[in-house]
Amino acid sequence: MTTYSKVLIIDYGSQYTQLIARRVREAGVYSEILPCTAADERIREAAPSAIILSGGPDDVGEEGAPTLSPAILELRVPVLGVCYGMQLLAHTLGGALSVAQDREYGPTELTVYGASPLWKDIPENAPFTVWMSHGNTVTALPTSFRAIASTPGVRIAAMADESKNIYAVQFHPEVHHSTHGTQMLHNFLFGIAGLKPDWTVRSFVDQAIEECRAKVGDADVVLALSGGVDSTVVAAILHRAIGSQLHCIFVDHGLMRLDEGEEVVSMLSTHMPGLNLHHIKAQELFLDKLKGVEDPEQKRKIIGHTFIEVFDREAKKLPKVRFLGQGTIYPDIIESYSAKGVVIKSHHNVGGLPEEMSLGLIEPLRELFKDEVRALGIELGLPEEFIWRQPFPGPGLAVRILGAVSEERLAVLRQADFIVRDELKKAGWARKVWQGFAVLLPLRTVGVMGDARTYENVVALRIVDSVDAMTADWTRLPYELLAAISGRIIREVKGVNRVVYDISSKPPSTIEWE
């Protein structure tokens, strides 16, 4: 079995912790995130080759603020502290902190000096921009440390103890706003920690197949196949690993995009010949249970519970099934705890399983980020147009129809949504945006068509740019493209006479309307 270099990232609550992990993976080094509440033994068991301490919102030394686990320094591996991580190192090792006279949030000019290996190939004594976010600052260095960078407002903006391979910076090198940030991380990973860039999706494929085959043995696996990228890539891995022992249940709730159910079945049969696919058409059941329901949270719960009921019923028809396959990915795992051990959200792949199923779990993607899952799908031979499909919510179009869901309203939204995606594709914008879709509003407005008064539906366009859906901004589409989308919807979709464009960002808004 392949053994990778590993960087352990200790999460102190920074909004950028996942970004650190992604930057390390992009450099070809495997990274793993643990909350700062993780037990010392768990940190030791991880056996990292290097450790990065993330930023965080707390003030070091205050009651309840996260502390530094003794195991981190006992491992005697290279350590890089970022923001809160730097302050925590200084506080723990005998330095001093104080509230900064000029708090720095955002771009700041940094000057590096001292010929540190952290600054390899970065010009010294030539100020450049980094991204700061702090209220406290280190005012006295721990014994054996030296200052290696400063800003106009902070005398000690980075520090190092080269004898122990401990480095710390007060800024965020992982964000793209920090000039030379990627170079700094590479210097830490390869120059200071001496790691090898041995983490690749290609090497992961063979390992994942081998592990799945060994774990399953001669038992059968059941997989809830949604048609999304994650579950489809899991199906491809398991199909290669165990062949006919895999049973995929595709619960078609009738809330998908235009012709999407048939497209999913066609794609699977083409690219995974011989796949045991159970296509359960349950649109009438779902629509009956959603009839008259307007509250978005209630709609989600009804769809979730009904899905589990149907899936559980079909799974129990398979007597040899001993394992449940899931498309859990790494952000799902991370988001199911916070840095202080409090659940941020109970993800459906992590905390929503029916207890009575009593099946072992197979989660071959649980170590991967979304972009790595897509790369893995390409490696497995799945079509690019499928792998790069936009994210789609589990409850489907039900949460893009504000108010009650009906077959009539679904038909209107499906046509409008198809036009949005079709025009984006024709104009070369489909791969440029994170998501582009239509929302059917629960109101009607007056219009004029063919000299006659109309009183019909309003469709909103939601088209956003994002990297990971944690934040998003509305896309500045060319006016000509917006006009083409609006014109087609009003001409071709019966029952719509007005189109509006959502120009709100996340936060404070969300990407989906419900």
Image: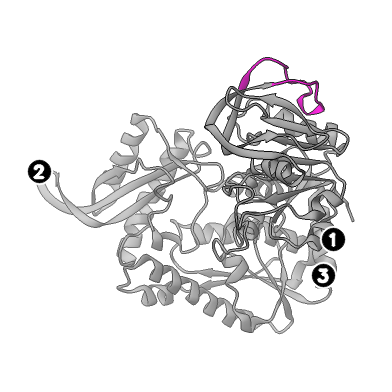
The kind of residue tagged 3 is Lys
Q: Under tag 1, what secondary structure?
A: helix
Which quadrant holds residue 178?
top right
Where's residue 480, x and y in %? Answer: 34, 30
Give the labeled residue for mark 1.
210
Residue 117, placed above or below residue 400: above
Q: Under tag 3, what secondary structure?
A: helix
Question: Looking at the rendered structure, which numbered label has been put on residue 259?
Answer: none
| Front residue of 198 and 15 | 15
Where's residue 407, x and y in %? Answer: 34, 66
Which quadrant holds residue 246?
bottom right
Residue 208, placed above or below residue 217: above
Q: CA distance from mark 1 to mark 3?
A: 9 Å
Which quadrant holds residue 348?
bottom right
Q: State the residue at coordinates (40%, 67%).
A: 297
The answer to whether residue 23 is seen in the rendering is: no
Question: Looking at the rendered structure, which numbered label has been put on residue 451?
Answer: 2
Do residues under tags 2 and 1 come within 8 Å of each other at their CB atoms? no
The span picked out in magenta is 112-128
Q: How is the image coloured?
A: one colour
Where's residue 259, x and y in %? Answer: 46, 57
Label 3 vs 2, first from the N-terminus: 3
